[in-house]
Image (cartoon, helix red, strand yellow):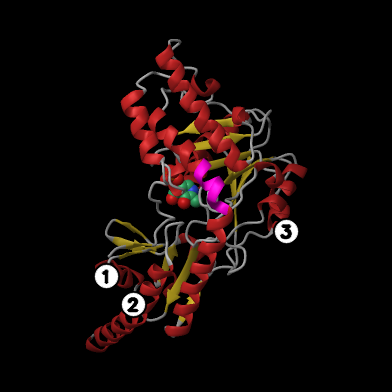
């Protein structure tokens, strides 16, 4: 028996996606830029995928650029907007301290070439305060990039309010909606953003597929130069098979979200309540109300998160920590650090992220196994400390 509770890392493909990918690979070999019938059929696949993504986020298909994933969408949005605004006299960028590395690293690189970057703090809630954004915005702010849902703790930022503030000061607003699109309603117009990044593999499309929505009239300098694909916004022959899968996954998410989201929320809440009740010394990290339906991040006092992750893996249960393993050392999560959590709580936090295929039986099994595993690890940890 295997139980997968790591949907924020990636999701299994949605129904119909593998078939759509195989069909394009086997039956539709054309290049979408070719004029002949093969090419036109491949182009129709892309148009279909674009329309599927557009329907998911309430957008016009012509404003959607299909990309090779969330990281690429984010790079195109941030670098493309900065390049377009290079001569505007505005050289200031604002983000939050808890963004995904795709945003943080890109802004660090832009900082090296002369952009000034403000990283807004978040408190224990993991939420950006509109007052902090208002105070940071200046007449030279070119772009604000604040994520919609956080990948580690699931908190959903007040993007509509933040975007309105940025716009009132003449700045563009980008949101990384990689962890929210396909899991909850994400509609570009009510959010009021200018740029919105999406990744396919987080909601059942193949890995390496994504999209960037660009508000009409917003100028971006293409970051990949070459042919005129994607209306000259992203050069290179498109991944027709993968993107056909993206379209199917987007349509599936849009059609099933109204049923799936409350069910997933109820299962997440059930898991959370069981752990908090049955395992002493556990705390949920981040705001528990403003959250995507599928995510909970819980600190377990007196253990190292990786030990519990491995113990659960041996039981066939896949979850995740926020820590990143680099050069053999485990770096505490920058998200939990930015929230001001004590060092121990940044090292003993685990992320459980559910999906549409998660069942009540899965949650009962996981909830039943955790107390004994935590108890055993705590006893072992105490013994190690005593021996030292
Ligand atoms: C919030 C967030 N943004 C961006 C990305 C990058 O997306 P991709 O894996 O499609 O490059 C991820 C992936 O984990 C993410 O969680």
At horizontal 40% and vertical 40% (from top left) the residue drawn is 17
In the rendered image, residue 6, in percent from the top left (x then y), is placed at: 39, 59
Which residue is tagged 3?
131
Viewer-proximal residue among 104 and 288: 288
* Residue 239 appearing in the image: no
Q: What residue appears at the point 48 percent right and 40 percent down from the top-left corner?
A: 109
Which residues fall within the magenta stretch? 251-257
Q: Quadrant of residue 201?
A: top left
Q: Residue, x 60% and y 58% (percent of image)?
A: 156
Would residue 191 appear left or right of 235 to someone viewing this image? Answer: right
Q: Which of the image's four quarters has the N terminus?
A: bottom left
User: For mark 1, what is the residue?
Assistant: 315
Percent of width and height locating residue 122:
60, 62
Q: Examine the residues drawn in magenta and state their main secondary structure.
A: helix
Residue at (61%, 48%) from the top-left corner?
Answer: 186
Q: Quadrant of the C terminus?
A: bottom left
Q: Which label lies toward us, 3 or 2?
A: 2
Secondary structure type for disc 1: loop
Q: In this view, does 173 lie to the left or right of 313?
A: right
User: The residue tagged with tag 2: helix, strand or loop?
Assistant: helix
Residue tagged 2: 369
């Amino acid at each position: 028996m295997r139980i997968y509770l790591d949907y924020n890392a990636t999701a299994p493909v949605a129904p119909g996606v593998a078939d759509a990918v195989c069909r394009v690979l086997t039956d539709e070999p054309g290049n979408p830029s070719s004029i002949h019938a093969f090419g036109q059929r491949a182009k129709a696949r892309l148009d279909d995928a674009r329309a599927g993504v557009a329907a998911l986020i309430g957008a016009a298909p012509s404003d959607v650029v299909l990309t090779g994933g969330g990281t690429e969408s984010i790079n195109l949005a941030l670098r493309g907007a900065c390049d377009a605004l290079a001569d505007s006299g505005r050289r200031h960028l604002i983000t939050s301290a808890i963004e995904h590395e795709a945003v943080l690293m890109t802004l660090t690189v832009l900082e090296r070439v002369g952009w000034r970057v403000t990283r807004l703090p978040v408190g224990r809630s993991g939420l950006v305060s509109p007052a902090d954004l208002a105070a940071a915005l200046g007449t030279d702010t070119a772009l604000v990039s604040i994520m919609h849902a956080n990948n580690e703790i699931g908190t959903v930022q007040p993007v509509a309010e933040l975007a309105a503030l940025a716009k009132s000061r003449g700045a563009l607003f980008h949101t990384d909606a990689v962890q929210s699109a396909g899991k909850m309603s994400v509609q570009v117009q009510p959010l009021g953003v200018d740029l919105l990044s999406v990744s396919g593999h987080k909601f059942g499309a193949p890995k390496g597929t994504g999209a960037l929505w660009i508000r009409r009239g917003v100028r971006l300098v293409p970051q990949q130069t070459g042919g005129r694909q994607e209306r000259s916004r992203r050069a290179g022959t498109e991944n027709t098979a993968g993107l056909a899968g993206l379209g199917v996954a987007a349509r599936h998410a849009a059609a099933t979200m109204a049923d799936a989201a409350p069910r997933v929320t109820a299962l997440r809440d059930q898991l959370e309540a069981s752990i908090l009740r049955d395992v002493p010394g556990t705390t949920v990290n981040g705001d528990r109300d403003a959250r995507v339906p599928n995510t909970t991040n819980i600190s377990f006092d007196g253990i190292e998160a990786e030990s519990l992750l491995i113990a659960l893996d041996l039981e066939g249960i896949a979850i995740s920590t926020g820590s990143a393993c680099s050069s053999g050392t485990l770096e505490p999560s920058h998200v939990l650090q930015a929230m001001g959590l004590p060092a121990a709580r940044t090292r003993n936090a685990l992320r459980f992220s559910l999906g549409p295929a998660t069942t009540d039986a899965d949650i009962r099994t996981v909830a039943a196994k955790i107390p004994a595993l935590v108890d055993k690890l705590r006893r072992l940890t105490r013994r190690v400390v005593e021996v030292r």
